[in-house]
Image (cartoon, rainbow, N blue to C red):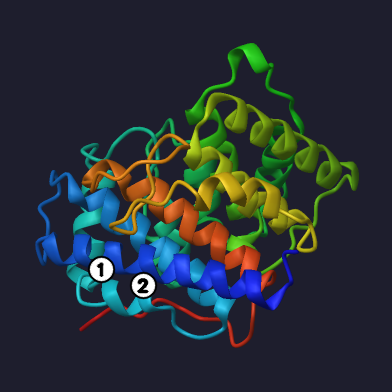
Amino acid sequence: MGHDPAYKQLLTLINARGQQWLRNRIELFPMLPAPDHPHLTGLAEIAVAAHICSGLRGTPAPLQTFIRSRFTPDFVGCFLDAFQHGSHPGDGRGTPLFRLLPHDERAQIRLPQMASLAERLALSDGSDPRLLAEAEAFLRAPVPAERLTERDVDTYACVLMLCYRFGAERPRFADARTYGDAFANCLRFAEWAERKGRLMPLAQMCYCLCLIDPDHDVAPMLGDIIASQRPDGSFPDRIGFGTADQGEAALRPTLATLVALHMAVHRRWQHPRPSVPLAA
């Protein structure tokens, strides 16, 4: 079903509505947020999602066009300043943005002493065997269901997508069993998200499962997600029908869903490999 043309057309339509909602949100953001501005992390996450969507399409996604006017060298400098001076949120949100920067710019970023695995992966060039081994151990480790939280799933998805460079390449894990263990974890996390009615982790697992196996059928999981889209085009935190327009709280679930929908439609990273150019 995931490769059926009519189904792909439906996903594309839902995707377009979600991107239009994001365009409206982006237009409300200031041209250059201050380092302590609450929109700073949101803009970084939009830029990362735009890069992924464009990479899967092989051409610039509309979201990349929408974010271009805000994704400037000044914005990146502001984000880095917030990160390096401790005013960035401690949960690592938005730091996958580092992977979009040129190597020489990433090399100048100094990580805090207690930098997370995801933050270190975002700054690496993929050639550090110790860092990859740490990521491998993290991805293989099971998380007991009674301790699982949405933040755990969010962190797991971030580490996995950075290992895969968002889908542009397949990591060379030392142990081939890592792929299977990570896949099994993603299936468990998806089941947990469905049971708890949490939309964002379910969308993240749709994306992650296809990173590991591009032919995996995520249509059954996407069913609940796409049925939850609001009339304004956004997606809520919780799976289920609703008619109310949404505000800032819908940003992350909507971004996660757009990435999952692009993955379901395009399946693999396309060529040429895109970048998200900085607006002058």
Cβ–Cβ under 8 Å for marks 1 and 2: yes
Look at the image and tell me whether residue 218 can be seen: yes
Residue drawn at the location 37% of the way across and 62% of the way down: 18
Asked if residue 161 lies left or right of residue 199, the reply is right
Place residue 106 in its image quadrant. bottom left
Q: Residue furthest top?
A: 146
Residue 23: assigned label: 1
Residue 190: horizontal and vertical position, in percent? 65, 36
Mark sitting earlier along the chain (1/2): 1
Residue beneath label 2, please? 63
Residue 73: horizontal and vertical position, in percent? 23, 72
**The C terminus is located in which quarter?**
bottom left
Type of the residue with mark 1: Arg
Return the residue nearer the eye: 175 or 52: 52
Q: Secondary structure at mark 1?
A: helix
Place residue 249 in its image quadrant. top left
Asked if residue 124 lies left or right of residue 26, the reply is right
Residue 156: horizontal and vertical position, in percent? 59, 38
Residue 88: assigned label: none
Residue drawn at the location 57% of the way across and 75% of the way down: 9
